[in-house]
Image (cartoon, grey):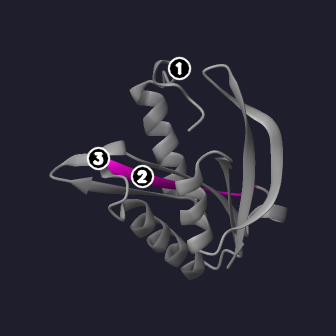
Amino acid sequence: MLFEPHEYTASLKQETGFINHYNESYNSSILVSELGGELIGFLGAEGGRSKKVKHSANIFLGVRKKYWGQGVASSLMIETMSWARRIRLKRLELAVSSNNHKAIKLYHSHGFELEGVKKYAISTNGTLEDENIMGCVL
């Protein structure tokens, strides 16, 4: 996630618009994972908008820290990849901090491969980190 908690300031109207965009687009989707009415994880897939990239989607994933290691992210990935195949997407792609070894391992386990590295792309508490660009051909 590229936002610090205090940086994300989307209004309810903006969030609703974001969700509506995903609901109205055949090649975009948002999945959520809940436990006892609590949102514990989500995975968004934003499909390409132009004709040249409509066959692919960029994904972003988040799981509450206290639920890490419990299969939430993997379940979201499995369902998203199944959805992507059903609608005949050909590719999923993502970006992840090169220091996020758990996420990289998860993505590799679902068939994603490293396609490139953006040097010093992320600054976390003054520390510059590389960002891995990963993709999966379906």
Residue in the picture at 52% in, 52% down: 22
Q: Where is residue 62 in the image (x, y as percent from the top left)?
A: 46, 48
The residue singled out by tag 1 in the image is 7
Q: Which stretch is magenta? A: 40-49
| Residue 60 vertical placement versus 83 (above, below) | above
Determine whether label 2 and label 3 are within 8 Å by CB: yes
Image disc number at residue 42:
2
Amino acid at circle 3: Leu
The residue singled out by tag 3 in the image is 39
Amino acid at circle 1: Glu
Query: Which quadrant holds residue 121?
Result: top right
| Residue 60 vertical placement versus 12 (above, below) | below
Per the image, label 1 sits on a secondary structure element best described as: helix
Assign the magenta stretch its main secondary structure: strand
Q: Where is residue 61 in the image (x, y as percent from the top left)?
A: 51, 52
* Along the viewing direction, whichever of 107 and 50 lies nearer the viewer: 107
Per the image, label 2 sits on a secondary structure element best described as: strand
Q: Position of residue 51 (x, y in %)?
A: 81, 63
